[in-house]
C-alpha cells in the first residue's frame, strides 16, 4: 500500500522489473494507492495487464490525525474490505446525472475494462509505453479525479485525451472528486461543470457515444471507494444515479 501521494513515481518507471512485479501479483501481492501512485498502476497495467487497486493510502487514509484517535473513514474501510477480501465491487450511488438523458447499460461481458486514476498523472503518461494501449482500453470505463487543478486546466487535460483519441474510445467516463481549487473573478463563472460540458459537447459533435457519469466517490476525499484497475465492469445509470459492479 502506498504511504501517500505527492510527486516522483514517474521517475521510478524505467527501473521497475515489470514481469517480476507481475509474478508477485500472481502469487497474491496486491498494490493499492491513488494520486501519484497512478503512474505505477497504469504502467503495470500497460506492461503486464496485471490488476492493481486505486484506493486508500496508508498515511493519508489509514493514519492518525496529530497523534489523536484514528480518523479512519468507515465508508473507505468497508469499500476496501469488500474489494480486498471478496474480490468484488458493488457501488450504488445516488447522484443527479447532468450529462445523460436516458438509461445507460454497459455489461461487463462486453469486456469493458475499468481503468483510470489521477487525471494529471494519466495525461503525463500519454504517448509513452506506460500508457495503456488502444487494444486494452477500447470500450473501457475510465475513472478520473484530481486535486488543486483549476477547471480550465481540467478541460485542457481532457482536451488532450480527446485529441489523442482516448475519450472517444471509452463507453463511459466516471468523474470522481475534483477539489481544492478556488474560482476567482477572472474565471467569470467558468467552473468544472462548464469544462466538462464543453468536452461532452465536442465528443457528441465527433459522433462518440461516450457518456459522462458524475458522483464517483473517489479521489482526495475522506470517503472513497477502492477500484480495481484492469477488470471487466458493468455500469448502469439513469438521471438519478448509477451502479458500478465487477467480480474477478
Image: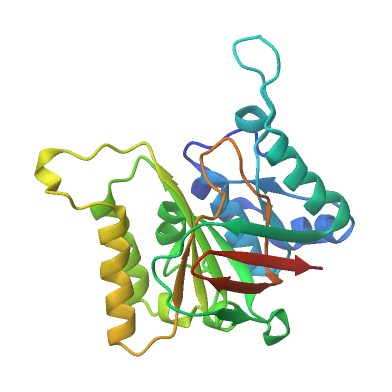
Quarter containing the N terminus: top right
Name the residue at 50% across, 49% down.
Answer: 10
27 is higher (above) or lower (below) than 75: below
**Is residue 71 something one can see in this rendering?**
yes
- Say above or below: 218 vs 201: above
Query: Residue 73 in the image: x percent, y percent?
Result: 67, 32
Asked if residue 182 is positioned above or below residue 118 in the image, the reply reads above
> Image point 90% across, 57% down: which residue?
27
Residue 90 in picture, x, y percent from top left: 73, 60
Q: Give x and y (percent) for residue 44.
A: 65, 61
The colour scheme is rainbow
Instruction: Examine the rendering and report whether any part of residue 1 can be seen.
Output: no
Indicate left or right for 40 with 20 as reference: left
Which one is in front, 110 or 245? 245
In the rendered view, does 103 fall on the left or right side of 1?
Answer: left
The answer to whether 15 appears left or right of 182 in the picture is right
Q: Residue furthest right?
A: 27
Residue 229: image quadrant is: bottom right
- The quadrant in which the C terminus is found is bottom right
Q: How many marks?
A: 0
Q: Nearer the viewer, residue 56 or 172?
A: 172
Residue at image location 30% in from the left, 70% down from the top: 199
Instruction: Point out residue 69 in the picture as x, y percentages from the top left corner.
Output: 70, 13
Instruction: Describe residue 89's horizontal placement relative to residue 161 as left or right.
Output: right
Q: Residue at x 61, y 44 (%)?
A: 224
Seen in the picture, residue 116 relative to 34 is either above or below; the reply is: below
Amino acid at each position: 500500500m502506498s504511504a501517500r501521494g505527492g510527486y516522483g513515481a514517474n521517475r521510478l518507471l524505467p527501473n521497475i522489473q515489470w514481469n517480476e512485479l507481475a509474478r508477485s501479483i500472481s502469487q497474491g501481492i496486491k498494490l493499492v494507492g491513488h494520486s501519484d501512485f497512478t503512474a505505477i498502476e497504469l504502467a503495470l497495467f500497460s506492461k503486464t495487464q496485471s490488476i492493481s487497486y486505486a484506493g486508500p493510502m496508508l498515511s493519508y487514509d489509514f493514519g492518525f490525525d496529530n497523534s489523536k484517535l484514528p480518523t479512519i473513514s468507515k465508508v473507505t474501510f468497508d469499500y476496501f474490505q469488500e474489494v480486498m477480501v471478496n474480490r468484488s465491487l458493488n457501488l450504488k450511488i445516488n447522484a443527479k446525472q447532468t450529462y445523460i438523458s436516458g438509461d445507460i447499460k454497459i455489461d461487463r461481458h462486453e469486456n469493458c475494462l475499468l481503468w483510470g486514476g489521477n487525471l494529471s498523472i494519466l495525461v503525463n503518461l500519454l504517448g509513452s509505453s506506460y500508457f495503456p494501449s488502444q487494444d486494452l482500453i477500447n470500450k473501457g470505463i475510465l475513472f478520473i479525479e484530481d486535486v488543486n487543478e483549476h477547471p480550465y486546466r481540467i478541460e485542457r487535460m481532457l482536451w488532450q485525451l480527446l485529441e489523442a483519441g482516448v475519450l472517444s474510445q471509452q463507453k463511459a467516463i466516471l468523474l470522481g472528486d475534483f477539489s481544492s481549487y478556488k474560482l476567482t473573478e477572472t474565471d467569470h463563472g467558468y467552473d468544472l461543470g462548464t469544462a466538462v460540458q464543453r468536452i461532452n459537447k465536442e465528443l457528441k459533435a465527433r459522433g462518440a457515444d461516450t457518456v459522462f457519469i458524475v458522483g464517483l466517490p473517489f479521489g482526495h476525499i475522506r470517503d472513497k471507494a477502492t477500484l480495481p484497475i484492469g477488470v471487466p465492469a458493468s455500469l448502469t445509470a439513469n438521471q438519478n444515479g448509477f451502479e458500478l459492479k465487477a467480480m474477478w
